[in-house]
Amino acid sequence: MESLNERFEKGQNMRSLMAQGDPSHYTLPGIDQLAPDLKRIINEALFGQIWARPGLDSKHRCMVTISALTAQGQLPLLRRHIERGLNLGLTPKQVVEVFVQLTFYVGVPAVEAAMRTTKDIFEERGLVFTPTQVYDTGLSADELYEIGKKSFEEHIGESSLYPIEDTDSIEMELGRLIDEYLWGAIYTRPDLDPQSRAICALSAMTVLGQYDRQIRRRIEGALKVGVTPQQIMEVFVHLILYGGYINSRTAMRVARSVFTEQGINA
């Protein structure tokens, strides 16, 4: 059994990888001055245990963290983790695409704020960024809708599993808009693979406390595109100290029920 000092050293090593020589990444403003015991606990538990777990690679852990902080609007910490993501190998295009992916999950204001922060970081680092522009404005709305329906089936499954009873309702209109733009225009973009898109969506939904059929379907979809049960559970473990253990444990129970329904041992 490892000692707490060994956990602390693992945490410091992880923070060194993230910092890449930037001393500001070792500080926890406020906590450093007011609660040194808490700083030690965070170093051991978050960086020495959770970030060091083998179930997710470091790039996906960065995506999970960035997605969660964007959903919560935690801009100072988001800035730090965007920098860490770049230090750990995320490309600028991947970072930006995480925010594009999250638009319908967390809303335009949160994404706009995250993009402003990211733009500042790129400029500070002297990164030359060429935006990905693939949205086909020559499509008709019906064509985009058909692309979205196909994309939904590829990423989630049959849309008829949870039908809307009143096909003339406002909810049906909203469903079509989501099919067109979330599934037709965003999920079909390059720069993130389907597994990464699923992980980002699950991360945001978890910290926002979404435990209805939406997160259940998102878990089903993650499995469909190749995210392993272990990776799904590891997303929730990773979020314990970013979104709270209650949210994580509730999401884990939903996932466990999905695995049971599908005959998956995890």
Image: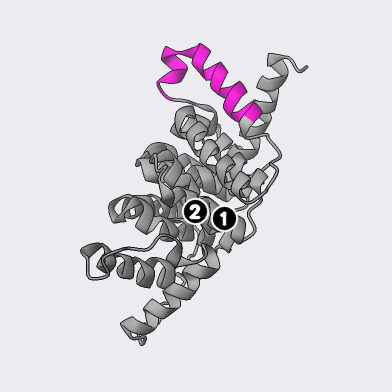
For disc 1, the neighbor class at 10 Å (few under 14, some 14 to 19, many from 20) is many
Q: Check contact, mark 2 vs mark 1: CB within 8 A.
A: yes
Given the current orientation, which residue lies at the most extreme front position?
Answer: 165
- Three-letter amino acid code at the position of disc 2: Arg
Residue closer to the observer: 37 or 231: 231
Q: Mark 2, residues whose alpha carbon is within 10 Å: few (<14), some, or many (≥20)?
A: many
Q: Is residue 87 visible?
A: no
Picture mark count: 2
Q: CA distance from mark 2 to mark 1?
A: 6 Å
Residue 157: tell me if it is visible.
yes
Label 1, on which residue?
A: 222
Residue at 41% from the left image edge and 13% from the top image edge: 34
The mark found on residue 159 in the picture is none
Please, what secondary structure does the residue beneath circle 1 have?
helix
The residue stretch that appears in magenta: 29-49
Q: Is residue 32 above or below residue 220?
A: above
Q: Nearer the viewer, residue 68 or 153?
A: 153
Tell me the element at label 2: helix
Residue in view at x 32 percent, y 70 percent: 176
Point out the image quarter for the C terminus: top right
Looking at this view, is 155 or 6 the one in front? 155
Percent coordinates x, y for residue 113 in the rendering: 32, 50
- Three-letter residue code for mark 1: Ala
How far from the left and from the top, in percent, is residue 67? 46, 47
Is 237 displayed left or right of 151 in the figure?
right
- Residue behind mark 2: 218
Question: Is residue 30 found inside the magenta-colored segment of the image?
Answer: yes
The quarter of the image holding the N terminus is top right
Q: Is residue 178 left or right of residue 44?
A: left
Residue 22 location (% of width, % of height): 56, 37
Residue 104 painted magenta: no
